Structure formats: C-alpha cells, structure tokens
C-alpha cells in the first residue's frame, strides 16, 4: 500500500510500487487531467507538482512518491482562479488543449518559486512540447501570471465552471452568448 497526499487529500494505492504515478493518478484516482503523451519524459503532458516542484509523472513511480504531496491540474484551482490559468486564457495561449494541463502545472510551480521570471527562466522551467506552437503567447501568459501573483495586475478572463453563457457574458464582456436566429441553426 503506497500512501501520499494528492490535491490535499490522503490517498493510498494498492498497486505495484513500480507503477508510474501517471497511471495511478489516471487509472486509480480518476484524475484524467494529467495526460499521457510520450511515456518517456520528453513532452511534459503529464506534469504534476510534487512537493512544490514540477515533475513528469510518467517518470516517477508511486514508490518514489510515497509520503509526498502531489498537486494535479484538478487540484490547482477548482474555479480557474489560479493566475496561470487566468493568464493562459487572457493571452490566448491555449489551442487544442492537450498539452495545457502539463504546461499550467510547470508554470504554476515556476510562479510559486519565482513570480517575476525572465523569458529565459520561463523557457527553462517550462520545457513542455506544444504541437500547436503557442510558445510566444505562452511566455507572455506566464510572465503575466507572475504580475497577477505579485498583485501588480488583475485579469478578468475565465469564468468559473458551470456558469451560464449569459452570466459569463456579464462577467467577461468579450464573451457573448449565441444569438438565436442570427447566423445560427434554430
């Protein structure tokens, strides 16, 4: 039985201790925001925060995670209020979204330890691969998240999950609910 804390909750996995943390999170804990990309640590899609550091969950076993504190994308912020999540939306640094959870986790760990990173520090701390090529916007988003974390800027970007389209439009004026009869299929 392997024990650790995942998203501030104690968990124990009755699995082979050599099981990659990625599969314990996805298959046993049903935390599927952590993505399987390459399985050998190259892409960063499986990035989680372990004791404050961004680590590729495909490369760490549950035995190595024993007794540690793990944060997945699901535990970062239930209402999308984390500065990195807000800045990623505001800077339009999300395309297909597959790599986004891993990027957000690497960026969140960076902002936690260094809320004023240079472009070079962002590039070094967030080595994730993005097949859509959002890298210039990604650097801007992470630096903006740092400003938000330092309380130098405020973002009104992503509405909370479960919000209606009409309420979202009131919260974020750039978002408009679909109009019936105007170019939409009725």
Image (cartoon, rainbow, N blue to C red):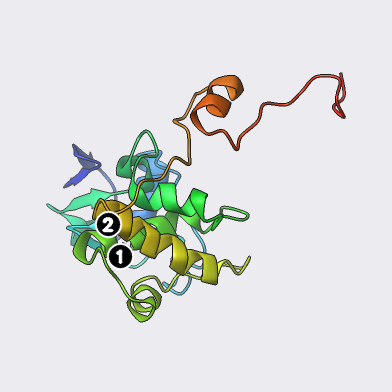
Q: Residue furthest front?
A: 152
Q: Which residue is mark 2?
A: 49
The quadrant where residue 179 appears: top right
Label 1: state its secondary structure.
strand
Quote the CA–CA distance across marks 1 and 2: 6 Å
Q: Which residue is mark 1?
A: 55
Q: Nearer the viewer, residue 63 or 51?
A: 51
Residue 12 x/y as whole percent: 21, 41
Density class for disc 1 (Cα within 10 Å; few <14, some 14-19, many ≥20) is: many
Q: Residue furthest bottom?
A: 120
Residue 72 x/y as whole percent: 33, 48
Q: Is residue 178 left or right of residue 117?
A: right
Density class for disc 2 (Cα within 10 Å; few <14, some 14-19, many ≥20) is: many
Q: Nearer the viewer, residue 2 or 74?
A: 74
Residue at x 37%, y 47% (from the top left corner):
73
Residue at x 42%, y 58% (from the top left corner):
102
Residue at x 85%, y 25% (from the top left corner):
182
Q: How many marks?
A: 2
Residue 122 x/y as whole percent: 37, 73
Q: Are marks 1 and 2 in contact (CB under 8 Å)?
A: yes
């Amino acid at each position: 039985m392997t024990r650790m804390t995942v998203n501030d909750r104690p968990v124990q996995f009755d699995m082979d201790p050599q099981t990659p943390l990625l599969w314990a999170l996805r298959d046993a804990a049903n935390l599927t925001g952590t993505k399987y990309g390459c399985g050998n640590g190259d892409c960063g899609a499986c990035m989680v925060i372990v004791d404050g550091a961004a680590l590729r969950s495909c490369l760490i076993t549950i035995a190595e995670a024993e007794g540690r504190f793990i944060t997945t994308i699901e535990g970062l912020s239930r209402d999308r209020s984390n500065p990195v999540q807000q800045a990623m939306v505001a800077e339009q640094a999300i395309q297909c979204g597959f790599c986004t959870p891993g990027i957000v986790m690497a960026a969140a760990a960076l902002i936690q330890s260094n809320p004023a990173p240079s472009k070079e520090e962002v590039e070094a701390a967030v080595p994730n691969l993005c097949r859509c090529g959002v890298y210039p916007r990604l650097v801007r988003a992470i630096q903006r998240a740092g400003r938000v974390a330092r309380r130098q800027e405020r973002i009104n970007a992503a509405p909370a999950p479960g919000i209606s389209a009409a309420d979202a439009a009131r919260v974020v004026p750039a978002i408009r609910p679909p109009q019936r009869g105007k170019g939409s299929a009725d």
